[in-house]
Image (cartoon, rainbow, N blue to C red):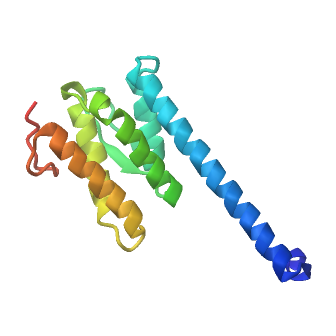
């Protein structure tokens, strides 16, 4: 801030413009990397377990079940999601959703989408943009599953 106060208004604007440009560039690279990882998974070059770890990391949750037949997610309270995390998660599910959302993993997807449904209604902590991205993701999943209502009460038709 001391450095900023010594700068002229024109220099401050130029510096802010440069920072904004770099921020946008980094965001595009990050989203490109997310899509790349998703495409690797779709091409069977990454295992499902790796993708599940990625999704959990992005959702800031951890599976606390003690056996492999159950899936119980707990939020990691000390970790908060920022706007980029929400966008990256939606981008990842947009890329791998139809591939990873299979009958064998329905119990896992049900847990993820419970959390996503909760996020889609969190107007206190999320921007409307992030909430709408989650709502779109939920709607796309409903269409793919053929459900009228894919909330936690949905009976997966598969």
The one nearer the camera, 49 or 130, is 130
The one nearer the camera, 84 or 47, is 84
Which quadrant would the C terminus be assigned to in this image? top left
Image position, residue 133 (x, y; %): 35, 56
Q: Residue at x 31, y 30 (%)?
A: 100
Q: In the figure, residue 92 lies in which quadrant?
A: top left
The one nearer the camera, 81 or 6, is 6
- Is residue 82 at least partly visible in the picture? no
Q: Residue at x 29, y 59 (%)?
A: 118
Count of numbered labels shown in the rendering: 0
Which quadrant would the N terminus be assigned to in this image? bottom right
In the figure, is residue 76 to the left or right of 2? left
The vertical placement of 130 against 104, above or below, is below
The vertical placement of 28 against 63, above or below, is below
- Is residue 99 at least partly visible in the picture? yes
Image position, residue 97 (x, y; %): 31, 36
Image position, residue 30 (x, y; %): 58, 44
Q: Residue at x 92, y 81 (%)?
A: 6
Q: Residue at x 73, y 62 (%)?
A: 19
Image position, residue 107 (x, y; %): 22, 35
The vertical placement of 4 against 137, above or below, is below
Farthest residue to the right: give it: 6
């Amino acid at each position: 801030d001391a450095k900023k106060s010594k700068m002229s208004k024109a220099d401050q604007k130029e510096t802010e413009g440069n920072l904004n440009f770099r921020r946008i560039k980094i965001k595009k690279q990050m989203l490109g990397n997310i899509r790349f990882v998703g495409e690797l998974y779709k091409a069977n070059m990454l295992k499902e377990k790796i993708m599940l770890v990625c999704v959990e990391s992005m959702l800031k949750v951890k599976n606390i079940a003690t056996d492999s037949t159950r899936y119980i997610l707990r939020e990691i309270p000390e970790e908060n999601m920022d706007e980029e995390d929400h966008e990256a998660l939606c981008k990842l599910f947009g890329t791998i959703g139809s591939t990873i959302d299979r009958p064998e993993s329905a119990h896992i997807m049900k847990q993820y989408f419970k959390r996503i449904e909760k996020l889609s209604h969190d107007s206190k902590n999320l921007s409307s943009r992030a909430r709408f991205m989650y709502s779109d993701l939920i709607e796309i999943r409903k269409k793919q599953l053929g459900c009228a209502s894919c909330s936690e009460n949905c009976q997966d038709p598969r």
